[in-house]
Image (spheres, rainbow, N blue to C red):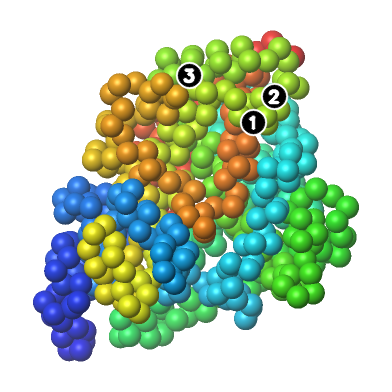
Amino acid sequence: ILFFIGKCVYNFFFHPLASYPGPWLSRATRLHYIYHQLAGDLPYKTLDWHNTYGEVVRVAPDELSYNSSRAYHDVHVWRDNDLRSGLEKDKTWYSQSINSVPVIVDHGRLRGIMVHAFSDRALARQEPLITSYVGLLIRRLRKLPIDQPIDMVPWFTSTAMDVILDLSFGKSVGCLENTVNGELHPWVRLTSGHVKQGLYVQAWRRLPAFISRNALVNLVLARIGRVWMEQFQVTRRMAGERIAAGTGREDFVTHLLRENSEKDGMTIPELEIASSIFMTAGSDTNATLICGCLFYALRDPMIWSRLANEIRGSVTQESEMTFTRLQKLPFLNAVIEEALRIYVVVPTTFPRRTPARGATICGRFVPGDYAVGVNGYAAALSEKNFARASEFHPERWLAEPDPRFERDDKKAHQPFSTGPRNCLGKSMALAFARSVIARLVWNFDVQLAPDSRDWAANQDVYVMFVKPPLMCWLKQRNST
């Protein structure tokens, strides 16, 4: 404990980052950061800190948080000299391996192979599979009783999980078919729980030794590890079965197999892990985006009316709602973009590490081997970046934006990250969201239930938002 106290004094007064502003507790010990991380309010606190201290905040003794577009460029985008691909990921935050197989160490090689699974050509071939599940969602919703509001969260979550499972493993476990009375399929609950458990493990890695070596803490972590391994073995078996089936269907694995080669292709363990990562990264994130779109659009009747008129006026029948046609609807795209901004799908900082020689970020030199990152939530909700940042205004994203928003720094909004390591699934996520929202609007008149008027307020955040019930009234339309 004496060593810990001495370390706090050093961090506050003598550390190489001591001159950076931030809450005094954060400057002394990472425990302050971990406390808010485990309390589920870290993004909100980070926004408050940036509002108080400015563009850069020392959120922990060895970590700096930024909230500007120029920080996105300096941290993530291609750079000069020998640092060509932005700063490297912070390996104390990311899992470096699963079952002894590296996850991020050889990221460039793996990404070069995986990018083909997420190309526009691949998405076009995957469209029938994706829209089949959206159609199933609509059919399930049509069978629900109309005399009570419906919680939309489990329905969107189950649809997203079915799509991702089918694209990743060549099969679905029937999440959507088996959603009953708003109860999530056990597979969905298991996957969502693992994200929160992962946060606990990540926090444990950074605890002081006198806490991290506590027997009770290690007992809990051992239990988490066993549960993780049990699920990994299940997904590994599913991935193995899909890989053995070859390239006969249009999904992620087909494209990975087609791009494989003996020299630099993905190994079988890497293919298995890639499928597992696709499932975890793509299911709840897609559901979160759609929930955010629906909530914010419904909360303003004028926005909802404009959205409904655009969608219903763009086609004469539902079958015409192709990915290509929906992509051309400006207000639908603006609603989705604004939802991504105000309801950041992953409001967590994904830190990078400065190289040994240091790096200049936002015009100021940062010494080597320290964590730096742009907090997307703090950037998107900053009044310095966006006028009326806490309000939902899709007009800011239209080709001829409202004059109120002409000074918005749109480069400070990077929901899929930026640079050579941005999110591969961007096109699929946007196409899926457009399809769900458009078909929901086509088939139903939707109203937000009074109990959900403040749905987005003060949600807990454990990597992603913990979404409470989003209660809506659905009235079927006489559409074809």
Count residues near mark 2 (Cα–Cα under 10 Å), then give few for <14, some for 14-19, many for 20+: many
Cα distance, mark 1 to mark 2?
A: 7 Å
- Give the percent coordinates (x, y) of residue 193: 53, 59
> Which residue shows up at 41% across the image and 21% down it?
400
Cα distance, mark 3 to mark 1?
A: 16 Å
Q: Which residue is mark 1?
A: 435
Q: Amino acid at mark 2?
A: Met
433 vs 177, nearest the viewer: 433
Image: 127 above or below 34: above
Position of the C terminus by quadrant:
top right
At mark 1, the secondary structure is helix
Can residue 93 be seen in this snapshot?
Answer: no
> Which residue shows up at 50% across the image and 32% down it?
336
Image: 47 above or below 223: above
167 vs 78, nearest the viewer: 78
> Which residue shows up at 41% across the image and 64% down it?
80
Q: Amino acid at mark 1?
A: Ser
Q: Which residue is mark 2?
A: 321
Image: 272 above or below 147: below
Left or right: residue 451 compared with residue 103: left
Left or right: residue 429 compared with residue 410: right
> Which residue shows up at 73% across the image and 43% down it?
121
At mark 3, the secondary structure is helix
- Give the percent coordinates (x, y) of residue 394: 42, 26
Considering only order in the chain, which callout, 2 or 1, is on the residue closer to the N terminus?
2
Count residues near mark 1 (Cα–Cα under 10 Å), then give few for <14, some for 14-19, many for 20+: many
Q: Residue furthest bottom?
A: 3
Badge nearest the viewer, 3 or 2: 2
Can residue 52 be seen in this snapshot?
Answer: yes
Q: Which residue is mark 3?
A: 304
